[in-house]
Amino acid sequence: MSDFSLDGRTALVTGAAGGLGRAYATALARAGADVVLTDLPGAEGLAETARAVAATGRRAYVHAQDLSRTEEIAPFADRVRKAAGPVHILVNNAGTAALERFNEITPASWSAVLRVNVDAVFFLSQRLAEHMIADGVRGGRIITVTSKNALVAEAGLAHYNASKAAAQLLTETLAVELAPHGITANTLAPGMVETPIDGGFPFDREAFEAAYRERIPLGRYSRPDEQAGALVFLASDAGAYVTGARLVVDGGVLADQMPRTRFMPPYRNTVDALDTADTADGA
Ligand SMILES: NC(=O)c1ccc[n+]([C@@H]2O[C@H](COP(=O)([O-])OP(=O)(O)OC[C@H]3O[C@@H](n4cnc5c(N)ncnc54)[C@H](O)[C@@H]3O)[C@@H](O)[C@H]2O)c1
């Protein structure tokens, strides 16, 4: 469908070395966009993402950058523009998390999370939006990957939760300020996705995932590629009138905050009798 085509567009995806970033980059390329991939210098996986993009027939550019170096962000964006031309779609996907009780969070670990999840999102969006305006790009898009944690608290993640909530409201503010320039700004809020992000946490992995699965109405974690359709929609002309919105892609987690589901009697199909009657009538 042509409204979902990204032909002729260039996207910049941060945190593109694996996980959601690779799935997002590949999906954007499949929809027709050339993709600039960035992650930490030396990040294993950037080359593999570049191969996945190239396999779609689109161009992949690789520009490593540590986004926690706030003062380097504008020059980085300028380098990308010089190498790849105007960027139409910015995907703020890079993110970091640490599991720490609130009283154990130090100024250093607090700002390590906030610098990547908030400061980098803001200053990269700021510079890219200025480029989009200066270059007169059509269909400018800023899409920030937040989390269900922008909306609900989760223990041990005070800095992460606060960072994702901040990213939500700063993106909404950009939506308002950039609307006169035809640039939309939205967030994607994944639920539980099979990626390495919480791989370092000291949990019994199986018990941890089983407990979370129980809270997911669809009964399973999302694969990264299942998150990408929502991104392509927001990036494309089909999403042109969507701005300042949050698109939750969580298998129903946020919709199901009360435990009643577990106490409901087994499902009984109340249309069985109706189906039988219809068939009998039709025969
Ligand atoms: N996996 C989940 O269940 C889940 C759920 C909700 C939201 N998210 C969000 O999705 C996004 C992608 O995470 P993921 O799950 O794919 O995990 P991931 O750890 O695979 O990806 C995060 C990427 O960001 C990069 N990154 C971190 N710090 C950086 C820095 N200073 N400079 C440049 N790059 C940096 C990492 O190297 C990594 O490649 C994150 O913003 C995360 O908060 C993930």
Image (cartoon, grey):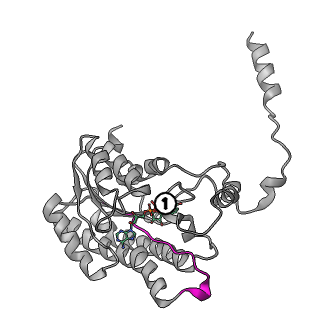
Q: Amino acid at mark 1?
A: Pro
Residue 5 % position (x, y)? 31, 43
Disc 1 element:
helix
Pinpoint residue 71: horizontal percent, then vertical percent: 26, 82
Q: Which residue is mark 1?
A: 196
Q: Indicate yes or no: mark 1 CB to ligand 1 under 8 Å.
A: yes
Instruction: Look at the magenta stretch and give its main secondary structure.
Output: loop
Between 227 and 17, the one lying in front of the other is 17
Q: Is residue 34 left or right of residue 237?
A: left
Q: Residue at x 56, y 65 (%)?
A: 148
User: Which of the 4 quarters of the picture holds residue 249?
Assistant: bottom right
Whether residue 31 appears in this view of the structure is no
Q: At 34% from the left edge and 73% from the top edge, which residue is drawn?
A: 177
Task: Residue at 38% x, 53% y: name it.
Answer: 22
Q: Where does the magenta region start and end?
A: 90-105
Numbered label tally? 1
* Location of the C terminus (image quadrant): top right
